[in-house]
Amino acid sequence: MKRRPLIIPACAALLFSVAGCSSKPAVRDVVEQPGQDITDGNIADPTADNGSLKAASAACLAGKKITGRPVRIVSTVAPITNLISLVVGDNSPVVTGIVPEGTNSHTFEPPPSAAATLEKADIIFVNGLALEDPTLAMAEANAPNAIVCELGTSILPSAGYQYDFSFPEAGGRPNPHLWTSPQLVLNYLTMIRDVLLIADPENFMSYDENYALVSEMVLQLDSAMFTATESIPANDRKLLTYHDAYAYFGIHFKYDIVGAIQPQSFEEPSPQDIAAFIDQVKSQKVKAIFGSEVFPSSVLEQIGKETKVRYVDTLRDDDLPGKPGEAEHSWGGLMKFNFITMVEALGGDASAIKSVNIDTGLSDKASYPQ
């Protein structure tokens, strides 16, 4: 198999750029081959404000070849840990996740035992965009020689950062949930592959083949979600969720993110907030309200009862379905489950998504903490 060109994400594969706090959808992206630029008329000049992007990308690609032993990789949230492990496949690098599934990753404080894991790491992958600041601080203190790769920060210019109810711009912490947009995940995969090629160049063919297999699965899910979305009337493509995890998803698939219940403090919303959401659900004729397994909320159930709108409490944020080792226990399994749940709750036909085979045939040997 011919190796694809090594792409430097600082100047390539920028998918969209949306200024301010708008969550309104942009024009649908044109799906091309993994690793290529995906452009439409709404993309901002990638050189306009991408100082942080260039710095993050350079940090990711500043590694060196590891010899004499397997490459040691540490990751944070489960969806990213899975993507890394799939690109690694049957090669020798050891991938260790440190954020337990079902944990609030925004408030996660790594235990003292994580310091020893980070200390031994050659590469530390995090999502970035201020999601894992305590972990980054621990890495800085205990793993000064490791490559720290902030995937989200390295592939999206700051003009594309989304700010919303749970992540207001005044707080300075953008919405970090880039992995809910398949097109952005393609860029994650490109960076993961490129970092691995630097650390373990002898296995570049294997990493590149794995990258292609995972990217194809991502593209299939992306295409199926567009097909399923077309079965939902445009006026019904509205998402009211508990956790604000779908800003980038909404832009890509043209869903209107009408709100999220969980405030910036990650505490319960005020009575005034609840009353405003009830009015919003009624006035915008929202078809379903989506809760989260990770963040159970009696507030959403209350809003559903008072507005007589269906309440669905099974969305997953970064808690992978199935058990470790199963195909469903993956980023693909997570997205497939959530996409089907949302489409069906909004009255659409999810058969295209159900037909996607998320089993890439690749081994996920990552360690997922309990």
Image: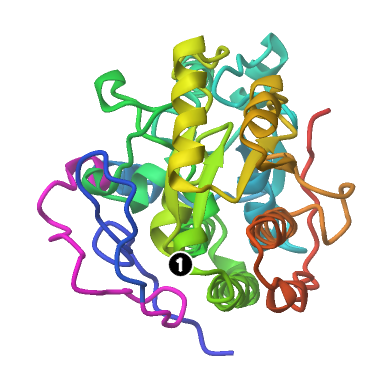
Taking the image as shown, residue 143 lies to the left or right of residue 360, namely left
Number of labels in the image equals 1
Q: Between residue 18 and residue 230, name the one nearer to us.
A: 230
Q: Residue at x 50, y 35 (%)?
A: 244
Q: Amino acid at mark 1?
A: Ala
- As drawn, 303 above or below 60: above
Q: How is the image coloured?
A: rainbow
Estimate the x, y position of residue 361 in percent, counting from the top left.
80, 73
Within-10-Å neighbours for mark 1: few <14, some 14–19, many 20+: few
Majority secondary structure of magenta residues: loop
Q: Residue at x 69, y 23 (%)?
A: 297
Q: Between residue 280 and residue 10, name the one nearer to us.
A: 280
Q: Secondary structure at mark 1?
A: helix
Q: Between residue 261 and residue 253, name the one nearer to us.
A: 261
Taking the image as shown, residue 218 lies to the left or right of residue 263, namely right
Kindly indicate the quadrant of the structure image that contains residue 166: top left
- Is there any visible trace of residue 211 in the rendered image? no
Estimate the x, y position of residue 180 in percent, counting from the top left.
54, 52
- As drawn, 20 above or below 190: above
**Residue linked to disc 1:** 234
In the image, residue 41 lies in the stretch drawn in magenta? yes
Task: Give the magenta part as a residue range.
Answer: 30-54
Estimate the x, y position of residue 219 in percent, counting from the top left.
56, 75
Q: Between residue 192 and residue 178, name the one nearer to us.
A: 178
Estimate the x, y position of residue 363 in percent, counting from the top left.
80, 62
Q: Residue at x 42, y 79 (%)?
A: 31
Of all residues, the one furthest to the left in this rendering is 48
- In the rendered view of the protein, which quadrant contains the C terminus? top right
- As drawn, 315 above or below 344: above
Taking the image as shown, residue 170 lies to the left or right of residue 366, namely left
Of all residues, the one furthest to the bottom in this rendering is 1
- In the rendered view of the protein, which quadrant contains the N terminus? bottom right
